[in-house]
Amino acid sequence: MRQLTTAAVAAIVATAGSAQAATFWTGYDFEFVKTGFAGTGPDQQDRITNDVWLTRSDVAGILNIASEEFYSFDVSPEGTLWAFGTIDDGVGTLSFSVWRDWHGGNPPSSVGRNAVLYIPADDLYIDIRFTSWGGAASGGAFSYVRGIPAPASAGLLGLAGLVAARRRR
């Protein structure tokens, strides 16, 4: 198992934007709820990007089921970094770390606190706030709210018109 050092995390954050412009999903417009004792199937995953699908088994921490079968103490959820604060605070001022280090080994301590989830592969920053964390007897239940992509400018059509126009094609 691979442990990311503080220096490695800093290097990832510092160099991620060099290939593309960062993307920011602000606010808390999407709610994800992982039901206890429900397994890790598609209906129990938050498929944020093509490569990051967050979920939790009936025990342990969250994992990226797109690239991991099980929670790994030092890495999971693979491909993500975390910081307390919001995008509006300025991502350059936030201190990102792997998920377990971020909450200090105590996931319930993150409930109700604003945070930013960073996906370095996509240079994507997402506002996130955990709203519940079930203990060992919860069957892996947890929930959060997070930002979503801003709708593309649709001009006079508006977003509903753009969707309807795409459906007609």
Image (tube, grey):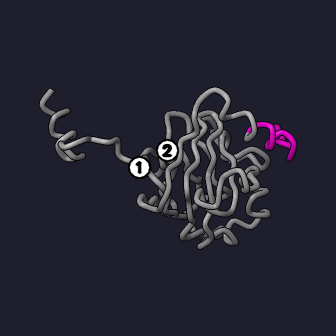
Q: Is residue 34 visible?
A: no
Tell me which corner region of the image, top left, top right, bottom left or bottom right, holds residue 12: top right
Give the labeled residue for mark 1: 43
Residue at 73% across, 33% down? 15
Which residue lies at the image location 47% right of the left edge and 62% below the top edge? 28
Does 7 lie within the magenta span? yes
Q: CA distance from mark 1 to mark 2?
A: 13 Å
Q: Which residues are magenta?
A: 1-12
Q: Nearer the viewer, residue 68 or 154?
A: 154
Tell me the quarter of the picture where residue 11 sits: top right
Task: Point out the residue furthest to the left here.
Answer: 168
Q: Nearer the viewer, residue 112 or 32?
A: 112
39 up-or-down from 139: above or below: above
Residue at mark 2: 48
User: Which amino acid does the dot numbered 2 rest on?
Assistant: Ile
Amino acid type at mark 1: Asp
Describe the element under mark 2 as helix, strand or loop: loop
How many other residues sit within 10 Å of disc 2, few (<14), some (14-19) or many (≥20)? few
Q: Position of residue 22 (x, y in %)?
A: 58, 39
Percent across and percent down for residue 90 are 65, 55
Q: Position of residue 59 (x, y in %)?
A: 64, 58
Q: Residue at x 86, y 47 (%)?
A: 6
Q: Is residue 161 visible?
A: yes
User: Along the polypeptide, which appears first: circle 1 or circle 2?
Assistant: 1
Mark 1 in CB contact with mark 2 (< 8 angstroms) = no
Q: On the rendered image, what quadrant is the N terminus found in? A: top right
Disc 1 element? helix
Q: For this view, does 96 lie left or right of residue 139? A: right
The location of residue 79, given as percent across then percent down, is: 66, 39
Question: Callout 1 environment at 10 Å: few (<14), some (14 to 19), or many (20+)?
Answer: few
Q: Residue at x 75, y 49 (%)?
A: 98
Please tell me in which quadrant of the rendered image residue 122 appears.
top right
